[in-house]
Image (cartoon, grey):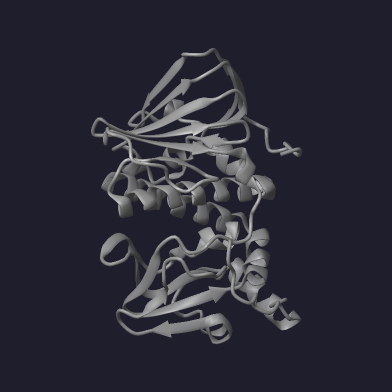
């Protein structure tokens, strides 16, 4: 990435090959998100002596899950960083990280893409029930003998979106009308609640209990916000990954990286959703930093929840 304006208000750090930074996340003071400027870093998230590890290359980010996830859940994880070669890092603590998210939209998109890829990979592991070596640019390779560690390699080449391999006829452009723009602006600065009747009338949809919202493997870039009810995220036939409630967002992974849906979604009880096209949510996303923070925190929590199931 050529524009690195977001490398601001943090700290630079150089570590030599073999250096280990181990963090018990019960002590949040040393927790940082690290951007890899050069070199190679092994990033391990440890739960009950089992490690899920990510090999991070230049342009990657490490440590988002612990810094951005809910504090109460972060307490159950530890983090370990190991330099696989001499490595230059740039890091932010929690306050600095969220400040950078609000200031630099390109940074926010990079973070969301990174989290989306990680969630796709750990979702795959819940389906396969095997420990596999994975890369961002390839399908999973053969399982490795040990199930104590999952190795995921993050590749800089996928920071840019790529279209799905096979895609149905693209949906027509939904450039917001002037009236719609005003509605979206009002929503962007308001709160998500069941009384949002005006916006629901324009982009809302209702589901009865146990209706499929979208299946795994389908194409689609719509992003959903739950107005009321609950939504189950699952891998067929019945591997429940998460249950989302009112105010939460889903579908953001395909929204930001244009990939196929990595899991299925269905309603749990009568459920009302707001459905946003790329054009509509792009306007909301740019208007208020709370949407960036909400997306990042939501993805970080879902990754945490999935890792604890591995």
Q: Is residue 126 left or right of residue 100?
A: left
Query: What is the x, y in percent for residue 51?
Result: 32, 33
Residue 181 quadrant: bottom right
Q: Residue at x 57, y 63 (%)?
A: 255
Q: Is residue 241 above or below residue 54?
A: below
Q: Residue furthest bottom?
A: 201
Q: Position of residue 266 (x, y in %)?
A: 36, 73
Say left or right for 158 vs 55. Answer: right
Residue positioned 42% across, 42% down in the render:
141
Quadrant for residue 176, please give it. Answer: bottom right
Note whether 252 is above or below 273 in the view shown: above
Q: Is the residue 34 above or below the residue 285 in the image?
A: above
Residue sitting nearer the eye, 8 or 106: 106
Front-most of 97 and 299? 299
Q: How many marks?
A: 0
Q: Looking at the image, which residue sits at the far front? A: 142
Residue 110 or 227: which is nearer the viewer? Answer: 110
Percent from the top left, x then y, of residue 192?
49, 70
Q: Quadrant of the C terminus?
A: top left
Image quadrant holding the N terminus, namely: top right
The residue positioned 42% from the left and 84% from the top of the image is 206
Q: Name the residue at 66% across, 49% down.
A: 160
Q: Position of residue 127 (x, y in %)?
A: 32, 55
Q: Is residue 271 left or right of residue 41?
A: left
């Amino acid at each position: 990435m050529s524009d690195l304006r977001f490398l601001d208000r943090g700290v630079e750090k150089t570590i030599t090959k073999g250096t280990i930074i181990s963090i018990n996340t019960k002590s949040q003071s040393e927790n940082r998100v690290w951007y890899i400027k050069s070199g190679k870093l092994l990033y391990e998230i440890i739960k009950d002596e089992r490690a899920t590890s990510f090999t991070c290359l230049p342009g990657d980010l490490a440590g988002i899950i612990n810094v951005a996830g809910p504090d109460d859940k972060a307490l159950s994880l530890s983090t370990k960083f190991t330099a696989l070669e001499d490595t230059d890092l740039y890091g932010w603590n929690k306050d600095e990280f969220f400040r950078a998210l609000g200031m630099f939209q390109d940074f926010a998109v990079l973070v969301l893409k990174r989290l989306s890829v990680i969630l796709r990979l750990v979702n795959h592991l819940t389906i396969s029930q095997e420990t596999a070596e994975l890369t961002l640019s390839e399908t999973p390779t053969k399982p490795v003998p040990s199930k104590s560690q999952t190795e995921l390699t993050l590749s800089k080449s996928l920071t840019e979106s790529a279209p799905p391999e096979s895609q149905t006829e693209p949906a027509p452009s939904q450039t917001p009308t002037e009236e719609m723009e005003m509605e979206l602006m009002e929503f962007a600065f308001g709160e998500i609640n069941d009384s949002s009747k005006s916006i629901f009338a324009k982009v809302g949809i209702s589901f009865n209990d146990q209706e499929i919202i979208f299946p795994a493997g389908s194409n689609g870039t719509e992003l959903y916000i739950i107005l009321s009810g609950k939504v189950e995220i699952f891998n067929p036939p019945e591997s429940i990954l998460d249950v989302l409630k009112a105010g939460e967002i889903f579908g953001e992974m395909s929204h930001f990286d244009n990939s196929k849906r990595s899991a299925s979604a269905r309603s749990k009880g009568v459920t009302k959703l707001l459905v946003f096209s790329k054009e509509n949510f792009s306007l909301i996303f740019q208007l208020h930093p709370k949407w960036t923070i909400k997306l990042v925190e939501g993805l970080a929590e879902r990754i945490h929840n999935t890792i604890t199931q591995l």
